[in-house]
Structure formats: structure tokens, C-alpha cells
Amino acid sequence: MTRTSTIPPPFVPVAPDASEDLLAAWPRDRPLAMLASHGKSPFARFSFAASPVSERQLRGPETIETLRRELSGPASGPDPAAERLPTGHGHFVMLGYDLFRHLEPTAIAPAPPTDDRHWPDAILLRCEGGLLQHAGSTEVRGDPARVPDLVPRILPPPTVDGLRPDPVDGDYRRDVARVIEHVHAGDCFQANLAQRFGSNFRGSVRSLAALAFRAAAPRYGAMLECGPGRAIVSMSPELFLETTPGRDGVVVRTRPIKGTRPSSRSVDELEGSEKDAAELHMIVDLMRNDLGRVCRVGSVRVSQPRTIESHPTVHHGVAEITGMLRPDLGIADLVLAAFPPGSVTGAPKVRAMRIIDELEPVRRGPYCGAVGWIDDSGYAVLNVAIRTITATGTPLEGCDELDGRLDYFAGCGIVAESDPEAEYRESLDKTEVFRRAIEDVSAGSMGR
């Protein structure tokens, strides 16, 4: 059973506090998974929250076959004006960056990064009903019996003790210089290099998510409680893949980001940067190639050339590519053909991934993978898991509470013109939204 209502045009924004209300009111004894979209744009469309009825943590080469079996999705739908909203029946999905090890084994370095957090390659959270917030209204989607009673409360502030580079002996500037050497040697045109930051943490991940969403206003935000002692809070501004089934087939959309400036600086600085424009152009070509592997011949096109988007802490350069999925393929085929997202790997893609694997000291885990929702109807929306906090530790009393640590990666696309010091500063700019959330924790600003 799905309760529906008339759906207004997709540019109606979600109320800024909608996801925070859901986080606060969801019962402590019921696990929560949610998408949380914010901001005034055509891409801030809805928030959806549910308690999973089952959880699968996938590891190893068999992960690929399981994803193909569980996430096939229909090749087309009866209605060309599909809702582009969750029906309530489907999966919340986390695809870890290191899933690439089973897709592109030639990208694995002889001495790969340390796996010190032991995240699964993928997590599937099956849901049969949830709450959808869209265009100022809230409605049950799927089975109403699967939706708990909500009781408003104030989330207790967690304890977070600052943000530090981790491992402490890493040298991001040195590793950026090594990537530049690879570029000059002709090994790649661009590679995206990241560094990890960390903090001790105790308390409610939902509290952290509320503060993070308030600070970032993410267009593709998500929060997953994915097993005892694990959680993900994603503040991503970037769309990896969206699929919309219709009578003529499945429309595919991706919106890669390249180029960043602090929001305190003029948009014109990023807009006029030839270096950043060239970086985005390379990734657009890469994503066109990835979509071309599974889309109908001639259907892949750049539907929106480079434009500048402004977010609470940064400006970004973004473009949009669309295509039509081949009728003999499903959603899993699309996702696996394009994974990992091109904007967080480099070009040529496989060679850039191997350079990343050689230089980064620790595995990325969920960072630079994808988090989102794949509906049984064939509608899907997956973010690029940047601006993403992962929490690991000892479970406490509530489903959302743990005692452990937070990890947060930030990185940059390195090209021939890159300067190690400038790239290091840009990586710090990308931690600003997390730092703001931590400052709000310290200030105790949990109430509105």
C-alpha cells in the first residue's frame, strides 16, 4: 500500500528543518535510514526516512553478483511521467569506494592502503515503508505498519573533540607533488587525492546529522545507521546517478562536480578559472564514456554545460550528462559500469585509481563511494559520498548512539598546473562544513 498525493513541480523546495524534525522524533529503539535534501534548487526535492526491515553487509567478489541480483530494477515503467519519488519499497544503499577492487583489479597497487576501519564493500538496507517529506507535506509511503509513531524530542548534543589529520604522519603536500610527477610523466591527466581527518566521538549520530545538515544544507544528504557501532552522515552536494523509468525506457542523469572555492570568495574567481574548467571537462568526457557503456547509442549528451553552484561554505563547478539506459540492462548494470564516480577518481580512470591506491595511506571506506536509494519501481538516486562523516565504535543504548570515532576525508583533483600548497588549502576548505558542525556541538546549539 502506498499513499500518494498530487505531486507539484520538482522545483518546490523541502522545508529546511524537515529532516531535523525526523531525526529528533524517530524512536531511539528503531534504526533509521534517511535521505535528506536541502536548499532552494530543482535538486532539493524530498526527504525520506524509514526503519530497515533487514540489513546485508556485503564483502568480497560475490558482492558484485549480489548487487546485480538484488538491484536489477525494471527496464521501463508504464507511466512516462514517473514520480521520481520513493514508493517506500526498496533499498537504502551504501557502496564503498573499495568496491572497485572487485570491478577493476588492475587498479590495485602492490602495497595498497591499510584497511583499519573494516567497512563492508556494500550495505543494503531493505525497507517496506517510510515517511516522505515533499513540497511542504508529509505522507506515508509503502506499508503504514512499518512506520513508527513519532514523538518530538530534543536531541542530546554529542561529545566531539576536534578534527585532526589521521594518520598524523601523512604528508598531503608531498603526495600531491608525486601525483603531479605522474601527470608530467604522462601516466594520467588528473588524479583525485584525499587525506583523512578524525575525531573522538560519543553520543547520538542523529544529533551530529542534524547539526551537519544545518551547516551544509546538502542537496543529496543521507544518514544511515548501518549495524551496531556504524553510521554514515553524508552532506554531499553531488549527484552520482539518478534513474527515472518511463514508457520509453530509463532516463539516466549524472552531475559531476569539479572546481571549488570558499564561499567567502567571489564566484567570478571560479567561473574564470581555466584550470578548473579543464578539470571538469575531463570528467565530463569520462562520465560520458562510463554512461556510454550501458546507454543506448546516441542517447548520451551533455544536457547542461559547466555552471557554478553556491553552497553554504563553498562554490562548485558542475555539469550534467544524461542518457537512456539500454533496455536489456538494469540499474545494477548502470551503477557498476560507472563506479567509482569519475569526479573522485581521475582520468584515465583506472590508471588514476591505481595512483590513488599507491599514495593514500588508508582505505577510503564509504568516502567517494555512493549512498542513496534504489526503489523497486526503478527510480534511484545515489550521491557521490563526499563531505561524508563515518562513525565507528562501541554501541551504546540507542540505535544511533556509539562511543568511538569519526572519520572525514577531503581531497582535490590534481592536474599538471596544480600547486601542492594550494591543493592542501583547498582540502582544508572542504573540511569547513564539518568544522562548523563541530563548533555547533561545542556551542550546544541543538535547539532551534
Image (tube, rainbow, N blue to C red):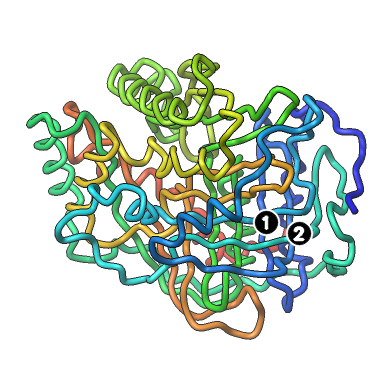
**Discs 2/1, front:** 1
Find out whether the residues at labels 2 and 1 contact each other: C-beta distance under 8 Å: yes
The residue that appears at 73% across and 51% down in the rendered structure is 48
Residue drawn at the location 56% of the way across and 78% of the way down: 228
Question: Which quadrant holds the N terminus?
Answer: bottom right
Q: Is residue 248 above or below residue 154?
A: above
Q: Say if 229 sits above or below 213 in the image.
A: below
For residue 36, side relative to residue 407 (left or right): right
Work out which residue is located at the far front of the displayed protein and give it. 328
Residue pictured at 61% horizontal, 71% vertical: 157
Residue at 65%, 44% in the rendered image = 73
Q: Amino acid at mark 2?
A: Leu
Give above or below for 373 relative to 162: above
Which element carries disc 1, helix, strand or loop?
strand
Question: Picture quarter containing residue 167?
Answer: bottom left
Q: Position of residue 187 (x, y in %)?
A: 14, 34
Spatial separation of the CA atoms under disc 2 and disc 1? 9 Å
Where's residue 260, x and y in %? 39, 33
Image check: 267 left or right of 127? left
Q: Which residue is mark 1?
A: 34
As drawn, the label of residue 189 is none
Identify the residue under disc 2.
Answer: 22
